[in-house]
Amino acid sequence: MNAKTSLKTTKSSLPPTPYYLLDEAAIVANMQIIARLCELSGAKALLALKCFATWGVFDVMQPYLHGTTSSSLNEVRLGYETFGKGKDSDNEKETHAYSVAYSADEIDEVLSYADKIIFNSISQLNAFKEQAAAKGIPVGLRLNPKTSNSSFIIADPARPFSRLGEHDKDKIAAVLSDITGVMIHNNCENDSFEAFSDSLADIEARFGDVLAQLEWVSLGGGIHFIAPDYPLEKLAERLKGFSEKYGVQVYLEPGEASIHGAGSLVTSVLDTMHNEKNLAVVDASIEAHMLDLLIYRESAPIAAINKESINILPVDMAKTADVVDNTIIYGRSCLAGDIFGEYALPNQLQVGDKIAFGNAAGYTMVKKNWFNGINMPAIVIRRLDGSIDVQREFDYQDYKASLS
Ligand SMILES: *Cc1c(COP(=O)(O)O)cnc(C)c1O
């Protein structure tokens, strides 16, 4: 049975706001770039489910990717069931398992879904390697190169005292006979090829002898190679050279790059007010529905107003204290700083206007929550043929069931 059909309510028209709107054509455009990178470099690409796990669009992603990677038991199971061998036993797609820390009572189940398992530390490796070996599952270890390309300390795997991976080369060398590969994830939306290449060079200088004894190396996610001006060929060449030099299969784990620009959060203006600037309140919330905006202190671009595509970038609120014509769009939670952004808009917003915030596919749906009991946005998919599927709607019972 295709699990997808059990939850889907196919409707031809759009539901009431708020809803996340995913555009399969935009996802496929990203997929084609990933597939090209893989073709040119020989790397394999795994979707990082922690960024995006809306499995209702996996059918259009599957032809381009080599599988999924995960951060927990639930994610590895989802990857196995919706993308990997659990979906179809002839399926070649790989399901990678990784977690910052596995518990002893979940490891057998994790292994039952995994084609490879990557441990975060040598102690976890030692605790579970025999169970993995008994099932014939190849084992990897996460390395921490102590350098990174992340402009946010909260998202920096190489932050001081980091728990993400092993850094001591001697200790790593001592467990080489237990592993066939390593995973290194130290980029975060890094759009500079030079910065990526330099940090790979650091990794080579630090761990070159280790790499030469492995079969595979995953370089994680966070490489923003889908940017229109990214030198994709150079990246491919660098990865190919790396792979040939050490004799390893390279994996990439794109999360954001897989779905960047492919989703929006469509909302309606519920109220307008004035307090030195124009204010509008929409029927969604950044804390509940686009949480990363809050965590990283960022604002959302506007992708459409009243269905008219438009690209309005937010202004830097720190610099616009006296620009009274601007409009601040707030979420409807009671958090004072629940702000989608401040914008210079062509027209004043009116109650009932529809605002679509852009780039709302990654790190949004996977983090949504019921703060304030606010209506959960539906998940709507614009299929490749242009038809609209209301994939999932949420109601009071879902809110109630999320607590007890
Ligand atoms: C977060 C993460 C990814 C995906 O990162 P993106 O920035 O979304 O590409 C890949 N691998 C690991 C280990 C991660 O922690």
Image: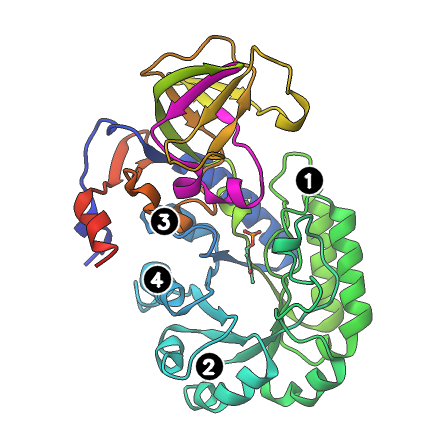
Q: Nearer the viewer, residue 33 or 275?
A: 275
- Residue 383 visible in the shown view: no
Residue that numbered label 3 is attached to: 54
Write the start and end of the magenta stretch as one range: 277-302
Q: Which residue is mark 1?
A: 230
Q: Amino acid at mark 3?
A: Thr
Which mark sits nearer the N-terminus, 2 or 4? 4
Question: Is disc 2 in contact with disc 3, using a CB cutoff of under 8 Å?
Answer: no
Return the residue nearer the eye: 271 or 28. 271
What amino acid type is highlighted by mark number 4? Answer: Leu
Label 1: how many Cα within 10 Å (few below 14, some 14–19, many 20+): some
Q: Residue at x 19, y 37 (%)?
A: 10
Binning the other alpha carbons within 10 Å of mark 2 as few (below 14), some (14 to 19) or many (20 upward) gives some
Q: Is residue 248 above or below residue 404?
A: below
Q: Earlier in the sequence, mark 4 or mark 1?
A: 4
Q: Name the mark on residue 78.
A: 4
Q: What is the x, y in percent for residue 381?
A: 32, 37
Lower position in the chain sequence, tag 1 or tag 3: 3
**Residue at 17 percent of width and 51 percent of height:** 6
CA gap, disc 2 and disc 3? 27 Å
Q: For the residues marked 1 and 3, what is the alpha-carbon distance in whole angstroms?
A: 27 Å
Nearest to viewer (mark 4 / mark 1):
4
Task: Give the label on residue 137, or none.
Answer: 2
Q: Is residue 83 above or below residue 282?
A: below
At x 21% / y 29%, what residue is drawn? 12
* Residue 304 in view (yes/no): yes
Q: Amino acid at mark 1?
A: Tyr
Q: Amino acid at mark 2?
A: Ile
Question: Along the line of sight, which residue is nearer the eye, 108 or 372?
Answer: 372
Q: Earlier in the sequence, mark 1 or mark 2?
A: 2
